[in-house]
Image (cartoon, helix red, strand yellow):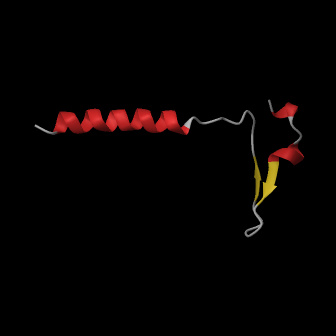
Amino acid sequence: SNEDMPLSERTHTHPGSGVSYVYDLPFRIRDRESDFRRIHAALLLCNSSQVK
């Protein structure tokens, strides 16, 4: 939860624009390889149903 990490550690100011961003917990860890495999399988299935 956000109480587990101080606001100062969840806040970042973009050096170019000066815009501050506050990140909320929990951060989500992504498994990009799994995402690409799932998308690739869906695209193959979609393409095979269109090709006749």
* Count of picture labels: 0
In the image, is residue 51 above or below residue 14?
A: above
The location of residue 36, given as percent across then percent down, is 45, 39
Direction from residue 32 to residue 20 in the image, left or right: right
Residue 28 quadrant: top right
Q: Residue at x 23, y 39 (%)?
A: 47
**In the depicted view, which residue is nearer to us: 14 or 46?**
46
- Point 86% across, 36% down: residue: 5
Horizontal and vertical percent position of residue 33: 51, 37
Report the residue that reaches farthest toward the bottom: 16
Q: Quadrant of residue 4?
A: top right
Q: For residue 38, which quarter of the picture? A: top left
Q: Position of residue 43 (x, y in %)?
A: 32, 38
Quadrant in the picture for the C terminus? top left
Q: Quadrant of the N terminus?
A: top right
- Left or right: 29 as drawn, with respect to 37: right
Residue placed at 81% from the left, 34% from the top? 2
Q: Left of 22 or right of it: where is 33?
A: left
